[in-house]
Image (cartoon, rainbow, N blue to C red):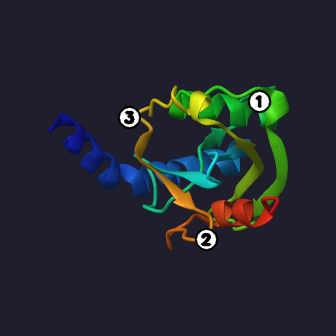
Amino acid sequence: MIRQIYLKAGKIMSPAVIALLGLQTRVTGQKRARIVVLNSNREVMLVKGVVSRGGWSLPGGGIEKNELPRAAAIRELREETGLEVEEGAVYELGYFERNRPDRPYDVYLYWTMMNEQQLKALRLNSIEIAQMQWAKLDALPANLSAATKIALDKLPK
């Protein structure tokens, strides 16, 4: 019951929080990092944040001061999912820049592959993540974020 109230509040507050995050991004120039997580079946982990526009995205978030983008992707994955991955097992996909004055968004994109043993540590951070699903790369949901679409298009075949 409390979880449902929390999720409803997150949905109601999302537009205001997203607007504030956009303002913070414009003022600070903070960039983000996101990571594609593939399981041994080549399914991708998709998440919906408690604060979101309602679409599916990838684990990730803001890069902290003096933090390298790859390290930020690894940290955000750990914070949001409880999953640990070695830096050497995280591969670069590229950089996505949206130059809209109302919604700037610069994100470094990475990917990693995790086996069943590693995925046993999966524990969603319920404060940040509302939902998680595994999706086949050839059967993705329609409502993917722009950065997620770009990252998945750049995955090695």
> Compared with residue 93, is residue 145 higher up or lower down, i.e. above or below?
below
Residue 95's quadrant in the figure?
bottom right
User: Is disc 1 placed on a helix, strand or loop?
Assistant: helix
Instruction: Please report the residue visible at 79 percent of the width from the left and 38 percent of the height from the top.
Output: 90
Question: In the depicted view, which residue is nearer to us: 127 or 135?
Answer: 135
Label 1 crowd bin: few (<14), some (14–19), many (20+), radius 10 Å? some
**Earlier-in-chain disc, 3 versus 1:** 1
Q: Give the number of the disc on residue 23.
A: none
Crowding at label 3, few (<14), some or many (≥20) Cα neighbours within 10 Å? some
SS label for mark 2: loop
Q: Disc 1 marks which amino acid?
A: Ala
Up/down of 105 relative to 21, above or below: below
Query: How far from the left and from the top, in percent, is residue 101?
Result: 69, 65
Q: Is residue 33 left or right of residue 135?
A: right
In the image, residue 136 above or below residue 35: below
Quadrant location, the C terminus: bottom right
Q: Which residue is depicted at the point 70% across and 37% down?
A: 73
Residue at the disc numbered 3 = 126
Q: Quick check: 20 left or right of 25? A: left
Q: Which residue is mark 2?
A: 138
